[in-house]
Image: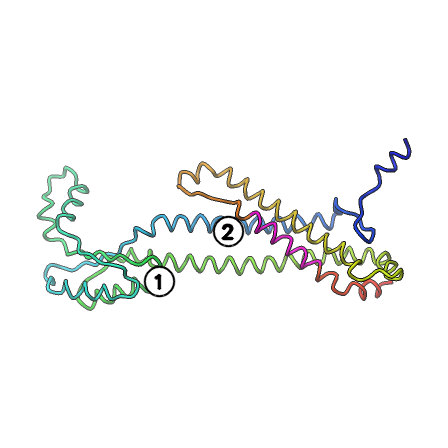
Amino acid sequence: MTQNKAQKNVKTRLPGGYQLPPFGIQQSLAATIVCVALWMLGMFWLGLQATEQWIGSWQDDIRFHVYLEHEQKDQLKPLMAKLKEVPGVDSIRLVQQEETEAWLSKWLGDSGLTTKEMAEVLPSVIEVLPERNIHEFLFTDIKDEAALLGASVNEEESYFATAQSLFDDMRLFLWIMSALIALAMMVIISNTLRMIILARADEIHLMRLLGAQEWFVRMPFLLEGALIGLLSGTLAWFMDWCVLQLMATWLSELQLDMNSWYLLPVMAGGGVLIGFTGAVIATSDVKQETASIL
């Protein structure tokens, strides 16, 4: 009975004699901080994915409209030729009067107004279809060309031209933020493992005296750092997945197909890389550090 009880108290150890997790309070705290940071990053990237889908849903329907008064109809063909030459413009077309009448009839309903007479006094409308990748100066170029021939543009449509640029800026910002947070997580794991190394300095020094190689001493800490990162990244992804499940109904109403599975290898692998790199930094000078406090 006593022997069985003693066997239950035996803990699995890594090479070098160090205990495997469950972690102590330092490792648990570091894993929690890394998990929360990766969870927030995952939510930001999922938000970017949703924004990209939303932008893609209406990007194919973007149109810019240029208006030319009836008194300047002689400028219609030169204007269309100029607009066609603007970089980023895929095609243009002249909106026919019948199309305008049909739109007015639908908009006015049974108001009793004559749509034909209204369509005749409205300006001529040129519809400009941009290319798939809209550059941020496209609307300005169209506006400048239109102004040279006395035409005007729909100013509110300028927001469509800048949306892609804002989206690219958002992606760049997230990459920079991800790199900075990853660096901060490396420092946290490195400092955590450094404290553990100093607490076990006598064991490490004894192992070195007995002839243990440096890689043999460092290996348990490297594995521990990688394991902290792996657990943190996996748990962070699971938290993101739970959030998506809670928002599933709302996302389906917006016709957004959110896929979090692609983040699982990224977050788990990223966590391992962060933890392993932090452990490499912490153990880079393990021999001198442990020897200095003995």
Locate residue 42 relative to residue 227 in the image: left or right.
left
Residue 109 percent across, percent down from the top left: 16, 39
Q: Residue at x 84, y 64 (%)?
A: 291
* Count of marks, rendered view: 2
Q: Residues within 10 Å of mark 2 (few under 14, many from 20)?
A: some
Quarter occupied by the C terminus: bottom right
| Residue at the image point whose x is 47% and y is 49% from the top | 47
Taken as a whole, is the magenta stretch helix, strand or loop?
helix
Residue placed furthest toward the bottom: 148
Amino acid, disc 1: His
- In the rendered structure, does residue 76 fall within the stretch colored magenta? no
* Residue type pointed to by label 2: Trp
Q: Secondary structure at mark 1?
A: loop
The region drawn magenta spans: 264-279
Q: List the residue tagged with mark 1.
A: 135
Side of 191 relative to 201 (left or right): left
Disc 2 target residue? 45
* Residue 67: x %, y % from top left: 19, 58
Q: Determine crowd level at label 1: few under 14, some 14-19, many 20+ residues with C-alpha closer than 10 A.
A: some
